[in-house]
Structures are given as structure tokens and as C-alpha cells.
Image (cartoon, rainbow, N blue to C red):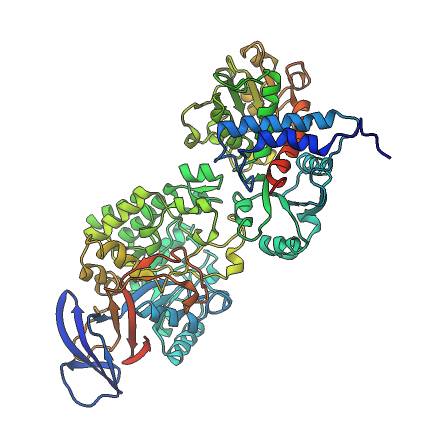
């Protein structure tokens, strides 16, 4: 039934990975706040092993056989949920899914009761997304399972930041000790105020030795985020100048209602990342976007589809990154 | 009914005296009288002083009895050392009807715990559109007019409310937050809210509204009581208006004297409260204001909710902290036990000065006064154990914290209601 040559050995992957993930002692992935530089770099090595699996003919290993992973998406998501589920199944985990719209949550059930109900079904890890910051933290009080944050409110989106940095490392051949981040500059442009992607990325890039410039209109650029190696500017030109990576964030239409933006047109005129702006960047600059994109608003189509764009690579890297997350949290514990 | 509280240290408006206090038929009979009594309470080593007054508690009746009701709330108040409580009117339905005011008082009297002096709403149905019948509400027993819980947005309505309240001699209490600036904020706006990724409520939402409400007090001569001041800027506005002789008074809560926005870092909605916990600088300023005597009362803003409601996420969980049973020990421990202020100065904020906010006589231990007494143990340290609360909200931000200054017995109407 199987050919030993084309099927990767679980033992092999485990051995490969285990040497790299020893330091990743966390039970949960709530945010990246307590991660050290070494942990990030080791995590990327684990991700390399997972990426190798995804290159094989049969893209499946038995590492999580017998484990059950539940996805709890209280807020809509397509790509993140799909990516997590793909990553779980690639390691032979069983996946159960909960989506707020189709659930008893609409009948007034609390997040705690929802969790306890699913917990009774013997779950090893939860992948959680919620519109309120802190829900993944709250859930840890009510279950012994691992909690993996798939995005909470404006606060944190750790797997997105991990895959962003991993993509950067790939592009800049950062396979040395420093990961290639030291002294690099990354610009994040857009709605910083509401962005969990920005908050998680600030942590990871600064921890790895890069400088981060946050850019957006004053209303969407909270000055409290300024700190060592994180600067703020209202000028895209200033942000992009000499940058090794530029990340555009999705601009949500509903921001106009709260007086946070004049119009999408004025926004795109002042803050769009496009070919003209990118000329100011470093020669090797890559262009990123966490998706989904509003083409011609925060990013020009030309740039999004151009040769600097690594947007599709980010999506592809989402699977091995999330495999590495599951592996690091669940195997050998 | 004759009761002797013996061996206590009587503390009455700054006067201190070791004596046996006799209560008879609901009033204070005198000191060291001797003779037969129905009951003796030994208060040896403890403080004996007029029962505390809380100008600000949410007792949730009518309509929200899952959170609290008069029996649980007034029993909790008695256990917290209170003899008199002003209940807030943001119930369901709101207390905007004289019959409801009268029935609440009757029910509280039948329960026999702490005394209830209800507040009534300023606007019909708490909608902020039309004034309630202040005079009829007053006649029914309402002592304060307030939409507390919901700021009055309409400045014209607030002006007219002030004018009418001034005519009737009623106190207007304000929840001073500018709601269009507060917006969807669930905590103080600042470094912590940006770190936690939670929508912030800026300091200016409070100070702007306090300024408006103080201006209207000055303009109309109405007695305006600013509830739960939480910020340095807001407090300074009140101080500035007081200097000009505006008829304003100001309240702080034990929440804002002991906690800051940092406690929300663990994402427990138990500490979600409105107005929100602020920064350490604000907290220190409020404590300083208390010590300087520019604060008029410490109101609990006791705001119980069910555990299930508080087990929601940070955006959806309701605002409010249940604290009436720990308010005094919290303030005693952090202000008196560490020698920042004297016990009698702290007690003033629960007794004479609180009464003065309402235009009431200062409670005292003089012969003929109401026999509403609290006995306070200032020596024994005991940890907060919310599972023992009489309030229905059996959880607390201070769970496990060792405190001193616990009320050990409370007498109301000359009867022991808690020990």
C-alpha cells in the first residue's frame, strides 16, 4: 500500500525537529511577548522541516495522529482557518470546527460554555479567533488543552507574524545565526490602530534585531506604540526609504464611519504603497500583505502582482509555520 | 430592645473615648449607663462608630435580581459596615416612578438590614430626553436624582434638571463621561490599552463632562455631586470649581483608589468598570486628593453582575465591580494602616462629609441619635474571600488580598444586623 521511499518517516521528522524545538517550552501560543530571539530562530528551523514535508509527493506525516484539534472561529476567516486545518491534517490530526455563525453562540451561549461543551469531546488544542482581545488568554482558565491564537481583536496574530518573518528569512537567505534580520528595516503601512498583525510583527522584528517603521494617518497611528527600534511617521516616503520589506495593511471600509478616515480615495492618494513609492526602498525590498487585499486602495495591483511581491509565498508559508506551531506545542508533551 | 456594646473605643467625629454604648428602641440611649439589657456585644479592642453611609450602590432591584436584590444587597451593605445606602436607579425598569420608590423603601424596611434611600432617574426611562417628576419622586422618598450608568448627553436637559432640582432642594448626581468621546472604549486609553489591543476611553471624556456639569452647577446653583471621579484632570476641574464656590461635591471609589489599568493585563472582565481604572499617576492623585480633604465621599459604586456575564469577552462583558463588603477595609488598609491619613479623617468620608453631600445631619453617637452603629476591627488581618460575600456577586478583584479594618458587627435601627 505504501512506498517507504516516498512517504516521509515520522521518526525522521521528529528527530529532525525535536533538536530544534527544545527551547520552545510554551504550552500555548497566545502572543509572542515572551518569546526570545533564540526561540524564534529555532522555530524557523522547525518550520524548514515542515516546509520539506510540503514539498514531498505525499504531503502527510503521522506526527499528530490521535490528536484532536478544534478550530474556534468566533470571527470570520477564510485563509487563516483553512491554513490551520491544512496544517493539522498534514500531520494526521483530527480536526473539528466551530464557526460562530452556524453555532449555538447565536443563541446566546457564552464563550466559556461553548468551550466547555467542546472540551467534553477530548480536544488537545484549540485554534481560536475572536473579535475581542484577550479571549485566548481567558480560555486558558477553563481548559487544560493548548490554546493557539489565530487572531484576537487588535492585539495579536502570532502565526501571521511568524509566517511574515519566516518569509523574510527565506528571501534574505537568513540561515545564519542572526536569521538575516539584524539591521534591516521594515515598514508597516496602513491602519495600525486596529491591526493585530502590526502589533505581533512589532514584537518579532524588533526581537530579531530589525527596525520597524509604522506609517499611517494620525488617526490610525497610536503614538503609544513608539519604543526602542519602533518609529512612527505619517509619510509613506519616509517609511519606505531604504526599507528591506514593506507591508501594506488592509484598509477597512467601515473606518470612514468612525471619522477615522476621510475617504478611501484620499487615503490611497496619500498612503498607497505602489511602484513609485517602492523606488525609494532598498534594491532587494520585498512587498508583503497579510490579506485580504483591497487592490488600488492600500496597495497598487501592479505592485501586488509584481516581482517584489511575496504575498503568495506568505500564504504558502502559512501551512508549514502552523505545522511547526502544532508540532512544537503538542508533540512530546 | 436594649443593647449594650461594651468595652469598645468610641470614635465620634474625631472624639475618642473608651466606653460602653447603650442602644434602646432604635436610638442611642447613652454611655456607661448599666442596668439590664437584652443583648451585650463585646467590642473589646475594636472601634465603635456611627454606621457608614454609601451614596452610590447598584442594588439591581427591580428587574435584575440575578445580579443582586434588596435582600442580598442590603445584607452585603450591612456586612460592609454600612447603615445607609443610596441605591442607583438604572434598574430594569428604571426607578422613574414614585410608586416604585415607595415600594423599594417599604421592602427594605421589611428586610431590616441597612437602610435604603433610593435615587430616582433624572430622565424618564433613562432615555435622556424628558425629566422625571422630581417632586413626586421626592415625596415618595427619593433623595437623589441621577441617570448614573448613563451620562446625560443633552446639556439643555441637564441645565433644566439642575434648575428644578435646585428649586426642590434635591441633589443631582452625575455620571460625568462624554459618551461620544468615550465611544466604544472598554478601558482607559493609553499605553496599556494599546498594548492589550482594547478600545480606549480617554481621560478627556471624563474631564470635559465634569467641566460641563460643574459649569451648570455654578450657573443654576444646583447641588451637583460628581460621582466616581477617576482622573487627575477630572479631579482638578472639581477642585477649580470648588475654589470658585460652585455648589459641587466629588466622590471617589475604592476601585480607583486601589487598582490601575495594569490589572486588565490578565484580560479578566471582573476589573472592567465604568469609568475605567486609570493610570498609577491618576490613582496617586486621587489618594492625595482624599488626604487633602478635597474629596467629599468614598462611594462604593458597588456594581454586581453574574459570573456568567463577567465570563464574557472584554468587549461584551458588562461594566462594574462588586465591592461593598470590602470598600472600607480596602481604604483602611491602604490609607490608614500605612499611616497616610488618620482613621477619623477616613471615617469622615463615610460619615459626616458623606451626609453633608446630601444635606443630612452628620451621624453621631450622641444621645437620641439613630442607633446605626458599626464595630470595626482594626487589628486583625484577614484575606478577602469572595465566596463568603452576602452579595450575589461572589468574586472580587481583591480575592486573597490581606486587609485590615474589617467591620465585625453592624447595628441598624438599634438591632444587630450583622456580626
* Image: A208 above or below B81: above
Q: Position of residue A126 (x, y in %)?
A: 63, 45
Q: Quadrant of the N terminus of chain A?
A: top right
Residue B66, position as x, y percentages in the image: 51, 67
In this view, the residue in front, A17 or B78, is A17
Viewer-proximal residue, A232 or A122? Answer: A122
**Toward which corner of the image does residue A277 lie, by quadrant?**
top right
Most foreground residue, B243 or B35: B35
Direction from residue B306 to residue A82 in the image, left or right: right
- The percent position of residue B406, horizontal first and vertical second, equals 29, 65
Residue at 69 percent across and 30 percent down: it is A12
The residue at 57%/35% (across/down) is: A157
Residue lying at the far bottom of the rendered structure: B36
Q: Is residue B158 visible?
A: yes
A277 versus B234 height, above or below: above
* Of residues B96 and A230, the one drawn nearer to the viewer in this rendering: A230
- Horizontal arrangement in the rendering, residue A60 relative to residue A119 (left or right): right
Amino acid at each position: 500500500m505504501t512506498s517507504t521511499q516516498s512517504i516521509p518517516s515520522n521518526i525522521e521528522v521528529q528527530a529532525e525537529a525535536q533538536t530544534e524545538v527544545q527551547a520552545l517550552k510554551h504550552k500555548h501560543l497566545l502572543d509572542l511577548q515572551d518569546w526570545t530571539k533564540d526561540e524564534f530562530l529555532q522555530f524557523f528551523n522547525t518550520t524548514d522541516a515542515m516546509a520539506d514535508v510540503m514539498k514531498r509527493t505525499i504531503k502527510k506525516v503521522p506526527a499528530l495522529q490521535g490528536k484532536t484539534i478544534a478550530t474556534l472561529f468566533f470571527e470570520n476567516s477564510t485563509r487563516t482557518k483553512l491554513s490551520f486545518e491544512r496544517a493539522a491534517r498534514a500531520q494526521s490530526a483530527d480536526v473539528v470546527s466551530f464557526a460562530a455563525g452556524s453555532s449555538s453562540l447565536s443563541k446566546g451561549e457564552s464563550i466559556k460554555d461553548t468551550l466547555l461543551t467542546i472540551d467534553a469531546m477530548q480536544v488537545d488544542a484549540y485554534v481560536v479567533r475572536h473579535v475581542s482581545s484577550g479571549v485566548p488568554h481567558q480560555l486558558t482558565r477553563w481548559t487544560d488543552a493548548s490554546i493557539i491564537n489565530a487572531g484576537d481583536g487588535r492585539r495579536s496574530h502570532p502565526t501571521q507574524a511568524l509566517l511574515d518573518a519566516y518569509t523574510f528569512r527565506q528571501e534574505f537567505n537568513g540561515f545564519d545565526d542572526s536569521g538575516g534580520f539584524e539591521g534591516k528595516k521594515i515598514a508597516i503601512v496602513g491602519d495600525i490602530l486596529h491591526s493585530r498583525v502590526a502589533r505581533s510583527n512589532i514584537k518579532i522584528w524588533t526581537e530579531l534585531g530589525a527596525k520597524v517603521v509604522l506609517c499611517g494617518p494620525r488617526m490610525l497611528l497610536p503614538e503609544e506604540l513608539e519604543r526602542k527600534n519602533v518609529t512612527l511617521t505619517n509619510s509613506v516616503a519616509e517609511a519606505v526609504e531604504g526599507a528591506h520589506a514593506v507591508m501594506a495593511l488592509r484598509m477597512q471600509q467601515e473606518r470612514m464611519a468612525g471619522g477615522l478616515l476621510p475617504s478611501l480615495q484620499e487615503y490611497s492618494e496619500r498612503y498607497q504603497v505602489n511602484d513609485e513609492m517602492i523606488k525609494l526602498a532598498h534594491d532587494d525590498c520585498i512587498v508583503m500583505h497579510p490579506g485580504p487585499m483591497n487592490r488600488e486602495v492600500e496597495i497598487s495591483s501592479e505592485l501586488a502582482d509584481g516581482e517584489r511581491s511575496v504575498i503568495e509565498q506568505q500564504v504558502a508559508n502559512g501551512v508549514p509555520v502552523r505545522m511547526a506551531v502544532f508540532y512544537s506545542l503538542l508533540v512530546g508533551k | 430592645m436594649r443593647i449594650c456594646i461594651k468595652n469598645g473605643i468610641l470614635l465620634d467625629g474625631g472624639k475618642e473615648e473608651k466606653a460602653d454604648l447603650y442602644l434602646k428602641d432604635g436610638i442611642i440611649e447613652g454611655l456607661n449607663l448599666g442596668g439590664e439589657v437584652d443583648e451585650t456585644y463585646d467590642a473589646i479592642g475594636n472601634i465603635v462608630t456611627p454606621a457608614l453611609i454609601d451614596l452610590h450602590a447598584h442594588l439591581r432591584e427591580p428587574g435584575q435580581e440575578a445580579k443582586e436584590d434588596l435582600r442580598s444587597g442590603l445584607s452585603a451593605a450591612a456586612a460592609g459596615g454600612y447603615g445607609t445606602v443610596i441605591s442607583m436607579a438604572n434598574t430594569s425598569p428604571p426607578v422613574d416612578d414614585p410608586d416604585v420608590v415607595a415600594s423599594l423603601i417599604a421592602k427594605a424596611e421589611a428586610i431590616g438590614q441597612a437602610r435604603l434611600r433610593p435615587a430616582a432617574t433624572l430622565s424618564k426611562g433613562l432615555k435622556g430626553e424628558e425629566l422625571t417628576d422630581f417632586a413626586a419622586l421626592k415625596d415618595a422618598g427619593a433623595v437623589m436624582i441621577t441617570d448614573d450608568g448613563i451620562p446625560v448627553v443633552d446639556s439643555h436637559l441637564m441645565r433644566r434638571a439642575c434648575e428644578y432640582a435646585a428649586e426642590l432642594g434635591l441633589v443631582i448626581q452625575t455620571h460625568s463621561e462624554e459618551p461620544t468621546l468615550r465611544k466604544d472604549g472598554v478601558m482607559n486609553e493609553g499605553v496599556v490599552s494599546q498594548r492589550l489591543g482594547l478600545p480606549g476611553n480617554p481621560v478627556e471624556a471624563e474631564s470635559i463632562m465634569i467641566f460641563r456639569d460643574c459649569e451648570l452647577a455654578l450657573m443654576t446653583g444646583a447641588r451637583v455631586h460628581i460621582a466616581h471621579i477617576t482622573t487627575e484632570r477630572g479631579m482638578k476641574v472639581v477642585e477649580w470649581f470648588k475654589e470658585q464656590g460652585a455648589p459641587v461635591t466629588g466622590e471617589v471609589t475604592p476601585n480607583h483608589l486601589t487598582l490601575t489599568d495594569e490589572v486588565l493585563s490578565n484580560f479578566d472582565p471582573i476589573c472592567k468598570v465604568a469609568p475605567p481604572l486609570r493610570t498609577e499617576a491618576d490613582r496617586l492623585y486621587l489618594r492625595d486628593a482624599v488626604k487633602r480633604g478635597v474629596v467629599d465621599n468614598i462611594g462604593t459604586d458597588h456594581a454586581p453582575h453574574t459570573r456568567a456575564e463577567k465570563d464574557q469577552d472584554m468587549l461584551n462583558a458588562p461594566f462594574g465591580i462588586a465591592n461593598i463588603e470590602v470598600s472600607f477595609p480596602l481604604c483602611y488598609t491602604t490609607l490608614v494602616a500605612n499611616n497616610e491619613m488618620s482613621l477619623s479623617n477616613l471615617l469622615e468620608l463615610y460619615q459626616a462629609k458623606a451626609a453633608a453631600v446630601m444635606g443630612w445631619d452628620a451621624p453621631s453617637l450622641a444621645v437620641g441619635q439613630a442607633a446605626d452603629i458599626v464595630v470595626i476591627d482594626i487589628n486583625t488581618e484577614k484575606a478577602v474571600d469572595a465566596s463568603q460575600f452576602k452579595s450575589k456577586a461572589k468574586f472580587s478583584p481583591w480575592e486573597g488580598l490581606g486587609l485590615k479594618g474589617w467591620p465585625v458587627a453592624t447595628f441598624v435601627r438599634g438591632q444587630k444586623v450583622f456580626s
